[in-house]
Amino acid sequence: MNYVNHTQEIKKLSEQPTVDKTANVYNSYLGAWTEIGPRVLLVDSMIGDYTYLMDEVNIHYTEMGKFCSIASHVCINPGNHPMWRVTQHHITYRSGSYDIDTGSELDEEIFNWRKAKRAKIGNDVWIGHGVTVMPGITIGNGAVIGSGSVVTKDVEAYSIWAGVPAKLIRYRFEPDVIRKLEAIAWWDWPREAIAAGLEDMKNMELFLEKYS
């Protein structure tokens, strides 16, 4: 039996997005201090400052806020198929892939339909391992989605959802606390103010008293 203990160094991020060499990012905008992990697929999306995506995350047509924590194997806005057609297979809207000439390699109607159902993820949202967020869903600030969930309905701010399909478990805080946090909107503070307030953020009561 051999003892193994790899040392973990604290990763140093920067204003320039950190994108793993195995990630594929297309037509997307990345905020400052963002991290895009191994084998991520990001398409036509916007990722806010300080948000990180762990390995094998798949995101299409999504607007995501700041300070989001996205665990591995999360899928946001997976591609719907045209169930109303005779076949829902790629062949009717990607005929070029099968060397069939229909006058256009791609059926833009289907892709525009998909793009129109953009997902919206708020700030400081935590999405657990293996979650699927269906097209067009909105998730509010401070929400939590439990691992393995399938989100089919909009999620309110500071609520916790889990299950297949995901259902409301509870709210993280009382309504008055949630209202104050939304009003403070600390995620929009300048970097200097966030750095100065980190210790205050560890105590909810003191934080609200000081910044409300």
Image: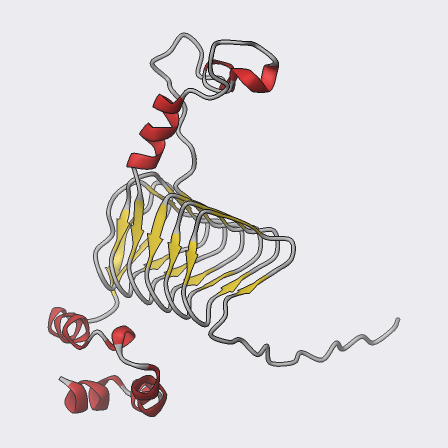
What residue do we see at 38% from left, 68% from top?
49
Residue 76 percent location from the top left of the image: 41, 45
Residue 52 percent location from the top left of the image: 47, 64
36 or 128, which is in the foreground? 36
99 or 145, which is in the foreground? 99
As displayed, is residue 18 above or below residue 192?
above
What residue do we see at 34% from left, 36% from top?
115
As displayed, is residue 131 above or below residue 82?
below
Quadrant into which the C terminus falls: bottom left
Occupied quadrant, residue 77: top left
7 or 37, which is in the foreground? 37
204 or 106, which is in the foreground? 106
| Identity of the residue furthest to the front in this view | 103
What residue do we see at 65% from left, 80% from top?
9
Occupied quadrant, residue 123: bottom left
Quadrant into which the N terminus falls: bottom right
As displayed, is residue 146 above or below residue 114?
below
What residue do we see at 24% from left, 47% from top?
154
> How was the colour assigned to the protein in this rendering?
secondary structure
Residue 182 percent location from the top left of the image: 17, 70
Residue 78 percent location from the top left of the image: 43, 37
Occupied quadrant, residue 47: bottom left
Asked if residue 162 can be seen in this view, the reply is: no
